[in-house]
Amino acid sequence: MAPVMMDVLEEHLDEATFLWSQWERALVSAECDLQATTRREERLLAHLDGLVVGGESAMSELLLPGLTTDESERISASTFALLAGNGAPALEKVLQVFDMGEAVQRTAVGRALELSAKNELEPVLRRRLAADDKALQLMAFQVLAFRGEVPQETRKEWLHHDDAEHVIAALRDVRPLPRDIVNGLLPQLLVDPRSGVSGAAIMAGLVCGTRMAWNACRRVAEEGGPGRRQCLVMLALGGDEQDSEWLVGLLRQPKLRPDVLWALGFSGQSSVADACLEWMDDPQVAALAGEAFSAITGLKLEGEYQRVPEETEALIPLEQEDLDANLVPPPEASLPIPVRSTVEAWWRKARKNFERGIRYLRGSRLDTAALLAALEREPMRRRHVLALELYIRSRGAHAVQTRAFMGRQHAELAAARAARTSFSMGPFAKNFGN
């Protein structure tokens, strides 16, 4: 191949690697919404298409070598491009890495397999569910679950497995649990002592609308233990006003404060907005308090309501720098810092428009239509919880895979809107059966 053409292909792979990383970060971003993430994704897919057009030369000189690097985004991009345009030989090479690669390689290949539209993947992945390698079994199950292709009989077998990781994987499958499992096995799984099993069983039980799962969720939120952060969120979005007030009380515990503020942002209660004001002066959690307040009331933290960022601190001398530190800032690092005084003045005037006991999102009552609209407009960071709420309240009828490519997400949202179903947005305790 002409050197100029190879240079172009190398640029496509470099850009695809960078944009894959940017796209994954956008999925949890406090700044990006669905529209902004879609634009970023379109750029990524354009470079991946450029690699597909490169044909055999791109495959042999760039994409196959790309599978063996230690850069996960490059592995994922190479895998996706190989699967998109290079037939059976490319699939065989990809599966070799999936089967025998290091953990970082297997995970990165698995991520591309989740997102790939290649139809031939389902049977080859199903065969790996019976592999001797436990890690390979679990990764194959995870990919199939993301794609909605786990055989129901396999899932039932895994729910009865002796190994906790197999049970957890089966509980996290995107589909609701079969009714015989809910009635027979779920009560045991909710109190299962194996690490992580009861937490996964709680979430699966909530989707099925079972009161025993809701009671277990409340216990974890109140008593602590693994999965507490997610149970706090469930208590905020599925509890009543008294539950929100109880969560507000937890703000007195410094270790819990960040998780509680995150959860309270989904409560929608005006009393919570009152409580958030108190923490807007605390530099450790001011941004989270502002995020929760804004989510409930709809006030945009910009202009006079946003604190001007302080100047960047001086560079740390190289000999003092922690070279092992994670240099990628967490999603909440980009949240605006509120100015309490101006926010409080705004709230004194706006407070009369909010009724106690009513859930609000961005200042409007939260109903089915508002929840669906929020999945198109809210920051990506918050959409994962909102999609879970949609899934729980619809009893598993409407699943939006918030870590999929936007084409799938738009289709799933369109299907939920087209169904024109309305479900209760009230407390879970009033809606769940035995």
Image (tube, rainbow, N blue to C red):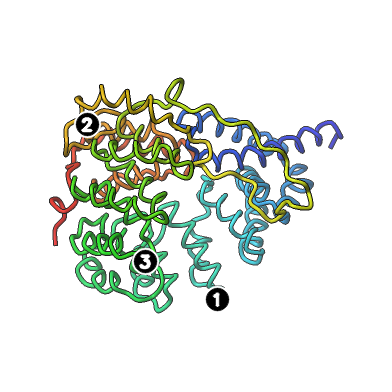
> Cα distance, mark 2 to mark 1?
52 Å
Q: Earlier in the sequence, mark 1 or mark 3?
A: 1
Farthest residue toward the bottom?
Answer: 162
Disc 3 secondary structure class:
loop
Note whether 164 is above or below 177 in the view shown.
Answer: below
Which residue type does callout 2 highlight? Answer: Arg
- Say the numbered circle drawn on residue 132: 1
Residue at 17% over, 44% down: 426
Q: Circle 3 sits on which residue?
A: 225
Residue at 61% over, 54% down: 108
Farthest residue toward the right?
Answer: 3
Q: Hey, which quadrant is residue 382 in on the image?
A: top left
> Cα distance, mark 1 to mark 3?
33 Å
Residue 52, percent from left and from top: 67, 39
Disc 1 secondary structure class:
loop
Which residue type does callout 3 highlight? Answer: Gly
> Cα distance, mark 3 to mark 2?
33 Å
Q: Earlier in the sequence, mark 3 or mark 2?
A: 3
Give left or right: position of 389 versus 150.
left
The answer to whether the residue labelled 2 contacts the one labelled 1, judged by CB atoms less than 8 Å apart, is no
Q: Residues within 10 Å of mark 3 (few under 14, many from 20)?
A: few
- Say the numbered circle drawn on residue 365: 2
Give the total number of marks visible in the rendering. Answer: 3
